[in-house]
Amino acid sequence: MIKKVLIANRGEIAVRIIRACREMGIETVAVYSEADRDALHTQLADEAVCIGPAPSSESYLSMENIISATIVTGADAIHPGFGFLSENSRFAELCEQCNITFIGPPSTVIASLGNKQAAKNTMANAGVPIIPGGKNPIYTVEEGMKEAETIGYPVIIKAALGGGGKGMRVADTPADFEESFRTAQKETQMAFGDSTMYVEHFVRHPRHIEFQIMADKFGNVIHLGERDCSIQRNHQKMIEESPCEVISDELRARMGEAAVKAAKAAGYENAGTIEFLLDKEGRFYFMEMNTRIQVEHPVTEWVTGVDLVKEQIRIASGLPLSCKQEDIQLTGHAIECRINAENPSKGFRPSPGTITDMYFPGGKGIRIDSAVYSGYTIPPYYDSMIAKVIVWAKNRTEAIRKMQSALGEVIIEGIDTNVDYQYEILDHPDFQSGNTDVEFIERMEADK
């Protein structure tokens, strides 16, 4: 069994992992940048090591510094959380070479799934439904236009490597293609240091549905149901819920079977997420696979009762899955709202600064995942998410009301947040009726 885990991350996910390790009797090591010296995760861990200056490129993305901290502290495992190095195959490979357990899939699997076009080809060969698109990497406008003509408009141009909504543009007609391609490729080069693109058909008004899977080292793979992640802005998720309002038991079984098939085709181990697009006719298409724990994992934990982080650690320790597919039952309804330090009325401008006062709600069916506290100064160098409010109730209507009640109690002073904006979404008639898709936010903004 793993005895000491170094958490190669910061913020609420670092705190989440530390708490899981505590409950399992595992020692923890926090790493932090100079800007995070007073961060909560550094105070909760058994040990804390500074790994560099504030910029993430010199700290949380410094493989050498993180590996050195792991060796110096005698940690035998690294949990990468999400973001930063969590889907970096080179980092996972370094862990393997240094005899450090990487709490995630093998480096070869991360590499094979990191290229989205290659991943799509793997899924197609395994019989998993994919969005119609080209099979070859695209480097020039001319190559892209040929693919687009074959696929049929509208098309979406995507970065072959990377994620987070960067390097993505839609072209509705051939006249739109060149500008969309050049913009997406430039953004891809800046964000990921790579200019490889691919082109696929653009599905209008889909829902973004993802299936959580778990796979151990013995070939056992299960899914833990779906999360509806359709409420998003600029491809960044804002609200997630489980289960999805429009997915029947029969469709869930088919999508879950496809997710398990996808994981097996990739030779997967540990926690992963299969992302699908679901169209209005109930057709679903593989989009990509995330080889890490997700920001929205708490909603799955609420409805299944499975602690996904503990399960990750068990699997990495060489233990079999603690449950079988028939043990997984979705009970009730869970919703997560991401609370960001930003100002929606000013174009969602980030709002770093010192929290002068704060209060989070509690009570039955309310969970807060956060790493901020009164007096904490939010640095300007990292992601703007500062907390997640997650609720559970016996049905969706009650879950929405519970979330509205919870958000109404949140107090965060000294900075701007999106709490009121989240409440506005929850109060919208289309959200309450379940009439949502990935373009919901655009429609809501246009109606103002």
Image (tube, helix red, strand yellow):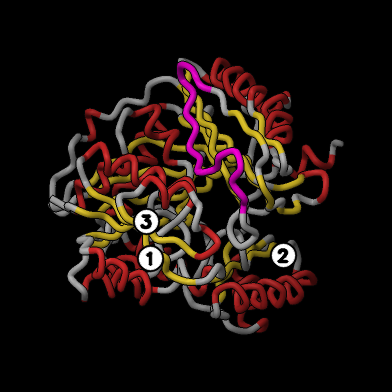
- The secondary structure type at the circle numbered 1 is helix
Q: Amino acid at mark 1?
A: Leu
Residue 288: quarter of image: bottom left
Q: How far apart are the alpha carbons under marks 3 and 2? A: 44 Å
Q: How far apart are the alpha carbons under marks 1 and 3? A: 28 Å
Magenta-tinted stretch:
362-378
User: Residue visible at 28% across and 73% down?
Assistant: 93
Q: How far apart are the alpha carbons under marks 2 and 1? A: 26 Å
- The secondary structure type at the circle numbered 2 is strand
Tell me if residue 68 comes above or below residue 369 in the rendering: below
* Front one among 140 and 397: 397
User: Residue 252, labelled with which disc?
Assistant: none
Q: Which residue is mark 2?
A: 171
Residue 183: quarter of image: bottom right
As for residue 216 lying within the magenta part, the answer is: no
Asked if labels 1 and 2 touch by Cβ distance under 8 angstroms, the answer is no
- Crowd class of label 3 (few under 14; some 14 to 19; many from 20; radius 10 Å): many
Percent coordinates x, y for residue 327 in the rendering: 23, 28
**Can residue 374 be seen in the rendering of this structure?**
yes
Left or right of residue 425, residue 334 in this image: left
Q: Which residue is mark 3?
A: 30
- Crowd class of label 1 (few under 14; some 14 to 19; many from 20; radius 10 Å): many
Q: Nearer the viewer, mark 2 or mark 1?
A: 1
Asked if labels 2 and 3 touch by Cβ distance under 8 angstroms, the answer is no
Q: Amino acid at mark 3?
A: Ala
Q: Which residue is mark 1?
A: 113
* Front one among 191 and 227: 191
* Front one among 225 and 309: 309
User: Residue visible at 28% across and 46% down?
Assistant: 214
* Front one among 341 and 247: 341
Percent coordinates x, y for residue 66 in the rendering: 36, 69
Figure quadrant of the C terminus: top right
